[in-house]
Image (cartoon, rainbow, N blue to C red):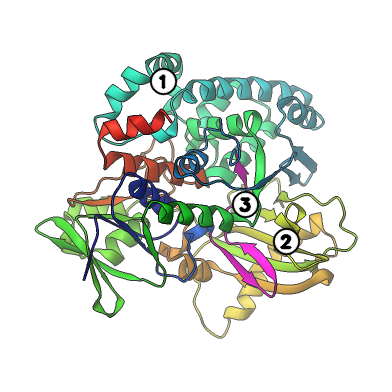
C-alpha cells in the first residue's frame, strides 16, 4: 500500500496541471491514468506513421511569455516550454454562400467580413472592440493567481484592485452571455450567425448560452497574442506537463484504472485500483466528468441524495463523430490547416452533422505524417443515443461519416481518392477511449441558467477539475481549473508568491 499527499484521477490537461502544480508546491503527488497514453481528450496517437490529435487543435499564446493562457503560465512556472509554429489566418469558415478567412489581425478579419456584409462588418467591429475592452480589464488578473476559497477576495482587492476597478463598468457582462452583448451591437443576421458559430466552436453553445469572458479571452488572445500549433501536436503539450510533474517529484502511473474513491466517515482516504490495489492519500482530485465521478467512482451513499441528483441532472453537449485520415499530399500546396464547414445555412449550426470541424496540422508540422502525406482530423457533433455494437454498426459508422467526407470535399475535392489510412470514430469510440459519460463534449450549462461548480465536493478531501468545473470547456479553461484547485490546496502566501514570478 502506497501513501501520498494527493492522488489525481485522470491525466487530462486539468488533472496534469493540478498534479504538476501541487508537486511544484512540494506535495507528494501521483496521477493515475486508466489508459496507456496520457492526455485525456488532448492525447495524441499514431497509426502507420501518421500522428493524430484526438481532440483540441487550436491554440493561442503557448510560446508568448505575456499571454493570458493559463497553460502557458503553468508551463513557465514548471520550467517547461513548447516549440510552436505561428500562423495567420488561423482558418477558413466555409458557408454555403462562400468561404471566410479568419484572421487574427482585426482589420484584416473585418475586411474579409465586409465582402459578405459591409454594414455587418461595422457592427462586428463595435462588438469586438467591446469584448477587447473586457479582455483588457481581465488581463490584469493573471490566471495563475486564482483560487476557489475566501482568500481570493483579499488577494484580488489587495494585489489587483486597480484591475478590479476597471472591470466594474462591465460587471453585468462578466456574469452574462455573449448573446446579450451581441444584441446591443449586432443586428445583421449574417454576422449574428458568425458570432454564434465562433461561440459554438468554443463552448458547444451558441452566443446566448456562452459566457462573455470566455469569448473575450478568445478574441483577446487571438488578436493580441499569437496563434500557433505545437510541434508534435497536442501530445507535445501533454508531454511538457508530464515532464513538469516529474521534474518536481510527481509520479504518473499509466494503465492504473481507478475503480473506486475510498471514503470513510465522510472523508476520502484514497483510491482502489483494479486487482484491489489501494493507494492512500487525504486528498483526491478527480479529472473525470461530474457524471463519471459521481456514478462510477463513488458509491451512491457517499453523497447526499439531493446533491447527487442535482449534479447528475447537469445537461450535456452531444458527443462526436470523428474521422482520422492519412492522405496523399501531392498537388495540395498552399493548403491551410483549420476549416469549419456549415453545410446548410437554413439549419441550426448546432444540429449534429451540419457544422463540421477540420484540422490538417501537417501543413505546419510535416513530421506528423510520412513524406508526401498529410494527417486529417474531421469531427462533428453526434448524439450518443441509439448507438450500439451490433451487426449494423459498421454500416452506420460509414453512413454517419458521410457528412464529414462531404465537408472535406469542400476543402480537398478529391480527398476520397487520396486516402491511404482511414479511421472512423463514433460516440461509442469517444466514450471508450476518453472514459467520458456518453462521450459528451462537456456540460451544456448556458449563461444565466447556471454556473460551472468550483473544485469543492461535499466529501472532505475530494476535489474536481476539468471541463465540468469552473471555468468550463476548452484547453485554457481546463488548465485554469487545475490552477484554481492546486492554489486552493496551499496557503495564500504560496500562490501569491507564484503570481509574482
Task: Tell me: residue 122, above or below residue 345.
Answer: above
| Helix, strand or loop for disc 3 | loop
Say if the magenta span includes residue 405: no
Mark 3 or mark 1: whose residue is earlier in sequence: 3
Task: Indicate the position of residue 134 as horizontal and vertical percent values.
Answer: 52, 22
| Helix, strand or loop for disc 1 | helix
Label 2: which residue? 367
Q: Which mark is residue 212?
A: none
Image quadrant in which you'd find residue 277? bottom left
Estimate the spatial distance between the alpha carbons at disc 3 and disc 1, rounded to whole Å: 32 Å
Task: Indicate the position of residue 314 as horizontal and vertical percent values.
Answer: 35, 51
Q: Residue at x 44, y 46 (%)?
A: 478
Q: Is residue 360 visible?
A: no
475 or 36, which lies in front?
36
Report the span colored magenta: 43-60
Q: Which mark is residue 57?
A: 3
Mark 2 or mark 3: whose residue is earlier in sequence: 3
Q: Is residue 191 visible?
A: yes
Task: Indicate the position of residue 155 as horizontal and vertical percent values.
Answer: 31, 24
Say if the magenta span includes residue 49: yes
Q: Is residue 458 left or right of residue 235?
A: left
Q: How many marks?
A: 3
Between marks 2 and 1 in the image, the one whose residue lies nearer the viewer: 2
Label 1: which residue? 171
Q: Is residue 236 left or right of residue 488?
A: right
Which quarter shows the C terminus?
top left
Estimate the spatial distance between the alpha carbons at disc 2 and disc 3, rounded to whole Å: 16 Å
| Helix, strand or loop for disc 2 | helix
Amino acid at each position: 500500500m502506497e501513501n501520498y499527499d494527493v492522488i489525481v484521477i485522470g491525466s487530462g490537461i486539468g488533472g496534469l496541471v493540478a498534479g504538476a502544480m501541487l508537486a511544484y508546491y512540494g506535495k507528494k503527488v501521483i496521477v493515475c491514468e486508466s489508459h496507456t497514453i496520457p492526455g485525456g481528450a488532448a492525447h495524441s496517437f499514431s497509426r502507420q506513421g501518421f500522428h493524430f490529435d484526438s481532440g483540441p487543435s487550436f491554440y493561442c499564446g503557448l510560446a508568448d511569455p505575456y499571454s493570458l493562457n493559463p497553460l502557458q503560465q503553468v508551463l513557465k512556472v514548471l520550467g517547461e516550454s513548447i516549440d510552436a509554429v505561428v500562423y495567420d489566418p488561423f482558418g477558413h469558415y466555409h458557408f454555403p454562400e462562400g468561404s471566410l478567412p479568419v484572421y487574427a489581425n482585426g482589420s484584416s478579419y473585418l475586411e474579409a467580413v465586409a465582402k459578405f456584409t459591409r454594414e455587418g462588418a461595422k457592427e462586428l467591429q463595435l462588438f469586438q472592440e467591446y469584448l477587447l475592452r473586457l479582455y483588457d480589464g481581465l488581463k490584469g488578473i493573471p490566471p495563475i493567481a486564482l483560487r476557489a476559497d475566501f482568500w481570493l477576495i483579499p488577494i484580488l482587492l489587495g494585489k489587483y484592485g486597480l484591475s478590479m476597478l476597471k472591470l466594474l463598468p462591465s460587471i453585468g457582462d462578466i456574469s452574462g452571455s455573449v448573446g446579450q452583448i451581441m444584441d446591443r451591437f449586432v443586428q445583421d443576421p449574417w454576422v449574428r450567425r458568425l458570432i454564434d458559430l465562433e461561440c459554438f466552436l468554443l463552448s458547444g453553445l451558441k452566443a446566448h448560452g456562452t459566457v462573455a469572458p470566455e469569448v473575450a479571452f478568445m478574441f483577446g488572445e487571438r488578436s493580441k497574442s499569437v496563434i500557433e500549433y505545437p510541434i508534435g501536436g497536442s501530445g507535445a503539450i501533454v508531454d511538457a506537463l508530464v515532464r513538469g510533474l516529474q521534474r518536481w517529484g510527481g509520479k504518473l502511473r499509466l494503465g492504473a484504472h481507478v475503480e473506486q474513491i475510498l471514503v470513510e466517515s465522510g472523508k476520502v482516504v484514497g483510491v482502489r485500483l483494479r486487482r484491489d490495489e489501494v493507494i492512500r492519500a487525504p486528498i483526491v482530485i478527480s479529472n473525470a466528468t461530474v457524471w463519471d465521478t459521481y456514478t462510477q467512482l463513488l458509491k451512491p451513499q457517499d453523497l447526499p441524495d439531493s446533491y447527487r441528483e442535482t449534479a447528475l441532472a447537469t445537461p450535456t453537449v452531444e458527443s462526436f463523430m470523428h474521422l482520422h485520415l492519412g492522405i496523399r499530399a501531392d498537388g495540395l500546396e498552399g493548403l491551410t490547416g483549420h476549416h469549419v464547414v456549415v453545410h446548410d445555412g437554413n439549419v441550426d449550426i448546432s444540429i449534429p452533422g451540419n457544422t463540421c470541424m477540420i484540422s490538417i496540422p501537417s501543413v505546419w508540422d510535416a513530421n506528423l505524417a510520412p513524406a508526401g502525406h498529410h494527417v486529417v482530423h474531421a469531427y462533428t457533433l453526434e448524439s450518443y443515443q441509439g448507438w450500439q455494437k451490433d451487426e449494423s454498426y459498421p454500416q452506420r459508422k460509414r453512413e454517419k461519416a458521410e457528412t464529414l467526407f462531404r465537408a472535406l470535399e469542400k476543402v480537398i475535392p478529391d480527398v476520397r481518392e487520396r486516402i491511404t489510412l482511414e479511421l472512423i470514430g463514433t460516440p461509442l469510440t469517444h466514450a471508450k477511449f476518453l472514459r467520458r459519460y456518453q462521450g459528451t463534449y462537456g456540460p451544456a450549462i448556458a449563461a444565466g441558467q447556471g454556473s460551472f461548480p468550483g473544485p469543492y465536493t461535499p466529501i472532505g478531501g475530494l476535489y474536481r477539475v476539468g471541463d465540468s468545473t469552473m471555468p468550463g470547456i476548452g484547453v485554457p479553461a481546463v488548465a485554469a481549473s487545475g490552477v484554481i484547485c492546486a492554489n486552493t490546496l496551499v496557503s495564500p502566501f504560496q500562490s501569491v508568491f507564484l503570481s509574482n514570478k
